[in-house]
Image (spheres, rainbow, N blue to C red):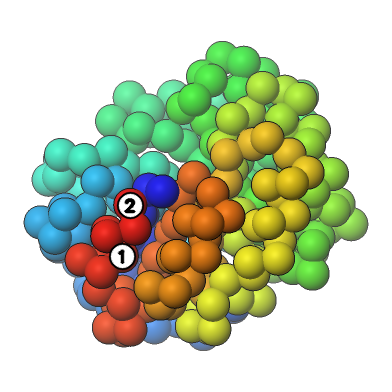
Amino acid sequence: MVIYPAIDMKDRACVRLTQGFYDKVTVYESDPVKVAKRWEKEGASHIHLVDLDGARDGIRVNESIVKDILANIHIPVQLGGGIRDTDTIMDFLSYGVSQVIVGTAAIKNKPWIRDMIKEYEDKIMVSIDAKKGFIATDGWESISNTRAIDYIRELESYGLRRIVYTDIEKDGMLAGPNFKIYQELKEKSNIEIIASGGITTVEDLKRLKEIKVYGAIIGKALYGGELSLQEALKWQ
């Protein structure tokens, strides 16, 4: 199981939102590059970056920060948030991002995401952000009428190998992940799952590993000290 320390960027700073609300922001560090270097130094094998401004507005406010992070660390970086067209995918891959994560555009433009999966294969992942089992879009500000499990099966039929699944109601709450949904996804699809939202304790990681998810994204618990990266990496 791959452990992904998360760096969520808003207004060029490292922040965390609570349950996806943009008015519930905690700023942890003004320099995301410093945070990325810290996680690499502490042993992270991968970094998970999210451009929150891009996710909500589709604007690359934090593009220069992404470039700076890539120039200053030597481990794979995956990036999500605001990736909604082919040019953006090509640009970030050319900068050195190892995998781009598409969210809103994958829901709103299915023919396009099918073509992107065919073209870029494992360099493309899709972010499934859900509330009560239904997919959210536009930085989690809109809830669709699409059931997450139905669309995951559809993505699998396109050839997609891996998703990031976030339970919005768990995100930033330090109350543990939604184990039930990850178990259901493993039973009903063959897609690799990176779990996100609510991961707080070693026990959470143990249970996720037992479910056999591909990876686990940890954010608020690392920044608040509830879980250290060294403890988390023992489950990698």
Give x and y (percent) for residue 140. 66, 65
Q: Nearer the viewer, residue 27 or 129?
A: 129
Disc 1 marks a residue whose amino acid type is Ala
Q: Bin the neighbour count of mark 2 within 10 Å (Cα to Cα): few under 14, some 14-19, many 20 and up.
A: some
Classify residue 193 as left or right of residue 201.
right
The residue under label 2 is 236
The residue under label 1 is 232
The answer to whether residue 219 shows anywhere in this view is: yes
Marks counted in the figure total 2
On residue 141, the disc is none
Disc 2 element: loop
Q: Residue at x 51, y 19 (%)?
A: 120
Disc 1 element: helix
- Asked whether the beta carbons under mark 2 and mark 1 sit within 8 Å of each other, the answer is yes
Q: Is residue 66 above or below residue 133?
A: above
Residue 177 sits in quarter: bottom right
Q: Is residue 58 above or below residue 197?
A: above
Q: Nearer the viewer, residue 74 or 45?
A: 45
Give x and y (percent) for residue 166. 60, 61
Classify residue 140 as left or right of residue 46.
right
